[in-house]
Amino acid sequence: MGDPGWPRPGCRAQGGVVLPTVVDLPEGHRAGDAGLRRASVSVFLAGLATFAMLYEPQALLPELTRAFDVTPAGSTLAISVSTVALAVGLLVLGPLSDRRGRTGILQLSLAASAVLAVGIALAPTWPVLLVLRGAQGFALAGLSAVAVAYLREELHPSVTSRAVGLFIAGNAIGGLTGRLLGGFLTDLGGWRVALGGVAVLGVACAVAVRVLLPPPRRFRPVDRSAPLLRSLGSAFTDPALLALYAFAAFLMAAFVAVYNAGTFRLESPPYDLTPALASLVFLAYLLGSASSPTAGWLADRSSRRLVVPLSVVVMVAGLGLTTLAPLWCFVLGLCVLTVGFFAAHAVASGWVAARAALGGRPVGQAASLYSFWYYVGSSVGGTLAGQAWQGAGWTAVAMLSGGLCLAALVLTLVLGRTRSLDPARR
């Protein structure tokens, strides 16, 4: 049975966006196929490299504060400029992938990002480092713009949610790897050695993805005669998609706020941990790499409308634990929060692709808009967290993150009331 989300011959997408007639598309890769394994591993490695390069400076924020004589809030710009540039890149590369294809953009994105990573490690001044980080963020948009859409197109629907969960697991492990390498290599040779180590990882993953990623079999470009703005606008005409975009922004803002400020808390009294020891807290990401495919598996068998809000509730519980004084409570809280975040994000991102396809909207553009708001949330949440920490310490950070989680939870109630487009799903 073919993919029910793919438009049938002669169908016309909503919002005036015409999709091509589809005849005899090959079936998507199923469980046990070599193509499924290669696609899953490739996108996993791409996610690992992308998030290692994107978020490595999070473990280095106190070190960058000292090296460049900037404030804690100012040091968070090393992350925020990249996530803002990445968000802008999504608006360009997402629609482009709907017309030109996914694989070339993904491979070029990784290659360019790895080259820029080398330049960042050699940056002579703070402004130069920020400019290069911005350019790298734009380049990294290629993965976020196409990965979920690629998996949705090339894999059979029976395995799509699990594959997306594995991709999110790669993101989690990449974020962990970048932060751990950052902490330990900083202790060994300083922040430049730390950034250089992750640049080497980025090059290795880019080569592996170039070799392993299967060529597309099911991609069909959207009608190039359709105006791009009208095509992009069609992704804003579904209330469920709008709610998912806002959900991504609130969820990511809450998560990044905790981890950005958490680094400063761990290196401050009463804990006074070294960068290497403080970076160990990012081992919590391993739990996120397990919860994301598990949540996808549960969503395949039950309901996205149930899994997503429950995951946000788990986040709130973890956040509450971080407000307790003992170090073990703080660490446990981060672990619980991380489990909930990656579970919610994995299911919500796959929900966007499925909803767009079933509604006849360009999948790449819908996925890009989800990621756009996701990284807008990252930029805003990360910057606000630095200011909250400077102003009133961890209490202010927890209140900020808690409010954002509650806003995300309200949106899940809105999603629960929207009409499903797939009669086979609840």
Image: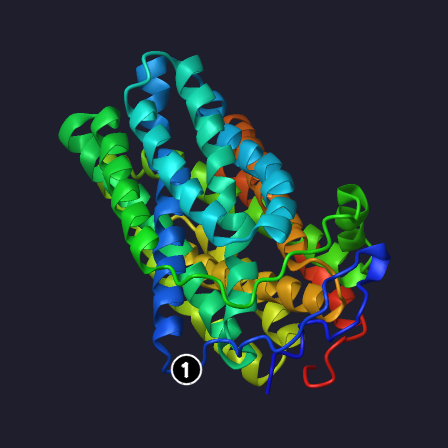
Residue 339 in percent (x, y) is at: 45, 63
Can residue 393 be seen in the rendering of this structure? no
Residue 45 in percent (x, y) is at: 34, 55
Query: Pointer 1: what residue?
Result: 31
Picture quadrant of residue 70: top left
Please tell me which residue is depicted at 85% across the width and 56% down the height of the picture.
Answer: 15
- Tell which of 321 and 413 is nearer to you: 413
Residue 41 in percent (x, y) is at: 34, 63
- Tell which of 247 and 50 is nearer to you: 50
Please tell me which residue is depicted at 46% across the width and 20% down the height of the picture.
Answer: 131
- Relative to 345, say whether 273 is above or below: above
Please tell me which residue is depicted at 45% across the width and 60% down the height of the picture.
Answer: 168
Can residue 246 be seen in the rendering of this structure? yes
Report the label total.
1
SS of the residue under disc 1: loop
Left or right of residue 150, residue 243 in this image? right
Residue 125 in percent (x, y) is at: 36, 12
**Looking at the image, what colour scheme do you see?**
rainbow
- What is the residue that sits farthest to the left in this orientation? 188
What amino acid is at disc 1?
A: Ala
- Relative to 57, say whether 314 is above or below: below
Q: Quadrant of the N terminus?
A: bottom right
Crowding around mark 1 (Cα neighbors within 10 Å: few <14, some 14 to 19, many 20+) is few
Picture quadrant of residue 243: bottom right
- What is the residue that sits farthest to the right in this orientation? 16
Please tell me which residue is depicted at 44% across the width and 57% down the height of the picture.
Answer: 338
Q: Quadrant of the C terminus?
A: bottom right
Left or right of residue 224, residue 108 in this image? left
